[in-house]
Amino acid sequence: MSEFPKREQLRVLSKPELEALASLNEAVGDLAHEWHSAIAVERRARSLGDGAERRLEGASFDFHAQALSGLYHHAFQYGRGVETLLWRYASASAALGITVLDRVVTGKPPLDQESLKRLCEEPTLAELEALLRIPVNRLLGARDADALARANEQRQRLLDGIEAAYEILTDDMIDERLDRPTAAASQLSIVAVEGCDPPWAALLSGIHTIADQTPYEIAYASRT
């Protein structure tokens, strides 16, 4: 994760806006590091368990394999928990960043305290989709054609990920399926179904990137 811009680079922001962005940025950075560590532990536990299973070969006692199966279960649960936290804070950071960037480039006044507090919470699926539909050209301003094309491609992948989230949440095969309006009004960390793919599966990487990059886009916009 990139180092957060210096305070003077973000002088266009109000003090509460700057503090909110910085705090979420730090949270996302630490959670991302912990998530990658959790993934490594999960993979190692799976590999150890697979090896123990192969060595059984009809043995009467399988405590080793049982223990490593339990280790993998706990490693998986921990990793999923950290991933859920990462999604919650990364999506909030991206939502806040896009909103603040949009208000800077359009010359709107700083966000009030209540708006900031709400934006520091995980957005609903509909709120996130609305922010992702803000035209990239408006947010990024004067950039070369290749840079804008890459940004638009990234944004379209995220909008495809939004649709994938809807498909997961409204799937007829799950008992807890939601209708589309209910899914739209939901926070994904709350409605994720245990045992199913997380609804943010196609979104997390791109949203994490936006959360990481947007403070620099704000700093750039404040210079131009």
Image (cartoon, grey):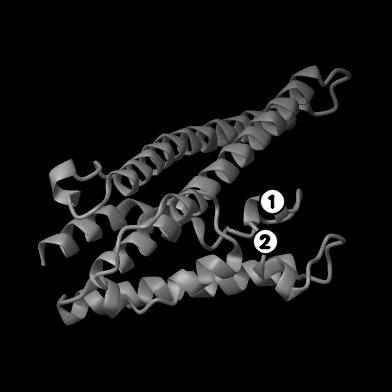
The three-letter amino acid code for the residue at tag 2 is Ser
Neighbour class for label 1 at 10 Å: few (<14), some, many (≥20)? few
Answer with the quarter of the image where residue 27 lies: top left
The three-letter amino acid code for the residue at tag 1 is Ile
Quick check: marks 1 and 2 in contact, CB under 8 Å?
yes
Mark number displayed over residue 174: none
Answer with the quarter of the image where residue 138 lies: bottom left
Residue at x 42% of width, y 42% of height: 28
Relative side of 20 to 128, left or right:
left
Residue at x 77% of width, y 70% of height: 171
Q: Is residue 198 above or below residue 128?
A: above
Q: Is residue 47 above or below residue 98?
A: above
Can residue 106 be seen here? The reply is: yes
Q: Position of residue 156 (x, y in %)?
A: 43, 77
- Disc 2 is placed on an element classified as loop
Quadrant in which the C terminus appears: bottom left
Instruction: Work out which residue is located at the far left of the displayed protein and give it.
Output: 223
Neighbour class for label 2 at 10 Å: few (<14), some, many (≥20)? many
Q: Position of residue 83 (x, y in %)?
A: 56, 43
Answer with the quarter of the image where residue 187 lies: bottom right
Report the residue marked by disc 1. Answer: 190
Mark number displayed over residue 186: 2
- For the residues labelled 1 and 2, the Cα–Cα distance comes to 7 Å
Q: Position of residue 71 (x, y in %)?
A: 69, 26
Q: Is residue 190 above or below residue 7?
A: below
